[in-house]
Image (spheres, helix red, strand yellow):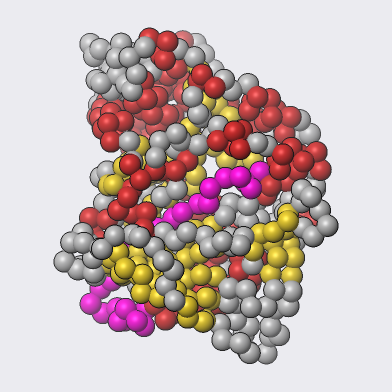
Amino acid sequence: MAPATQMAAPPPRARGGSFCVLRTARVAPSSPDGVPMLGERTVPLTFLDAIWLPTPPVDRVFFYRLGADDDGVDAVLSRLADSLSRALHVFYPLAGRLRLTPGKTNRYELFYQPGDAVAFTFAEHDDGVGVDELAADDPREVAKIAPLVPELPDGGAVLAVQATVLLPPARRGLALGVTVHHAACDGSSSTHFLHTWAAACAGAVVLPKPPVIDRTFIREREDLYDYMVSRTKEESDKFRSPDVADSKLLATFTLSGEILQSIKDRVAGVAARRGAPLPRCTSIVATFAVVWQCHIRAAIGDVEADNKHHGRAHFIFPTDHRARMEPRVPDKYLGNCVGPCFASAPKEEIAAADAEDGLFTTCAAIAAAVDEGTRYDPDYWKRCTEHVGGMSASDGPPLAVAGSPRFRVYDVDFGFGRPAKVDVVSVAKTGAISVAEGRGGGIEVGVGLPPERMERFRRCFADAVAWLSSPSRPVTRDMDRSAPGHSPE
């Protein structure tokens, strides 16, 4: 049997003197004793996968604090590589590559053959900034975090990983970067893989259930497949941030359970005062509502022209269709099985001087998007294409969402404890926000913005939390003092 891990020379990178690539391994799937080695396999992409062909990969970095009782760094890295090899045996499509299906002009597949492997980079980081600073919630330069996640190798690779030892000054740490091409799988699938890898590394007796690699569960839509692969680069760029990622800051904002309840109470109060129907304001809807409001207020502060305050703002977030499709798709299906929900509202109403009114607007729009987006009927995709076609370029790119609190990223324990922090670094490229379960409860949100806009967002969010922490009463309050045209009472 061929070795599961083969060493290679470090790839040429100009990442700066504080970051050093030690070596790169090619980690191939390893077969358990008594199980035949994997042969050549192909997994066709469905129309749900093809949606993501033109999008950037998803970059996550997990920060871990290594204690004095943990194994030495070399032992930790060896264990990570060995367990990755075992996890890839059941997640073999992630060890393959994305290619055009032979004989086809617009159909794609994941192709695995013996010898294929995942690039695993080992690196060191030492610039006087330790794990505690890198794993902070406060705004940090994306340029300092980006080297901790690997780039996908050329040739159609869909997965790459990197383990970076964070040298003291104070505390030894490890940054585990994972890059996944979204066309290979959605967030539910990729985090299923991460939980499996972590359990294998930690020596768990029972691993999570294996993935279901059977694309026949997805009822194909040839018309939608053709539409997805024919989209121009200009259309795909409509959903990306125009700002340069490395010039941005990345920060995390947390909404506690108490604040989320306060949002629900405020929205219910506005509905009662107006005699309007009460939107279905769940915790995730409440999170999206206040973050979208702060994001719009921060963006309005970028411009002086009054016409930029007008028009509509758009918000897009994914919903899992595994339980809604017919036939039902297994929970552990490896691939993409998500669709978009679209919310839209006038910018003036979102950024209203009365904070409660603005919050009600965003919550109602998002709740309506949930109701429509989770209705997976024959007209679902027609409605989606109509939403996309109805977005005006003058409105600016929509705010999109990556991640979910249901992915339990803070339970990804490789045997040296829960992560101190998890960042979705790619939101700095796409202009999206990330969401995850809060480490101490509630929900946390990752935001990547240019410095001036980040400061406006930070002030807006802090004011929102302070306002939501106060006794509920009808108050007119400006949650972002920097936004022109909105003065606090």
Viewer-nearest residue: 116 or 198: 116
| Residue in the picture at 61% in, 87% down | 2
Question: Can residue 294 be seen by looking at this rendering?
Answer: yes
The image shows residue 253, relative to residue 152, as above or below, that is above
Say which of 31 and 11 sits in front: 11
Q: Position of residue 456 (x, y in %)?
A: 28, 28
Residue 461 rendering spot, x and y as whole percentages: 30, 31
Residue 62 located within the stretch drawn in magenta:
yes
Instruction: Identify the image quadrant of the C terminus.
Output: top left
Using the image, determine if residue 280 lies above or below residue 218. Answer: above
Relative image position of residue 372 (x, y in whole percent):
64, 29
Residue at point 56%, 61% (across, down): 154
Q: How many marks?
A: 0
Quadrant in the picture for the N terminus: bottom right
Instruction: Using the rendered view, name the quadrant where residue 41 is placed.
Output: bottom right
Q: Nearer the viewer, residue 399 or 471?
A: 399
Question: Which residue is depicted at the point 51% across and 19% down?
Answer: 394
Horizontal arrangement in the rendering, residue 461 relative to residue 51 (left or right): left
- 119 horizontally vs 165: left or right: right
Residue 442 magenta-drawn?
A: no
Q: Position of residue 299 (x, y in %)?
A: 37, 25
Residue 414, by quadrant, is bottom left
Q: Quadrant of residue 379?
A: top right
Q: Residue at x 83, y 57 (%)?
A: 103
Q: What stretch of residues is rendered in magenta?
A: 51-76
Horizontal placement of 211 versus 306: left or right?
A: right
Q: Is residue 150 above or below residue 361?
A: below
User: Is 91 drawn above or below residue 138 in the view shown?
Assistant: below
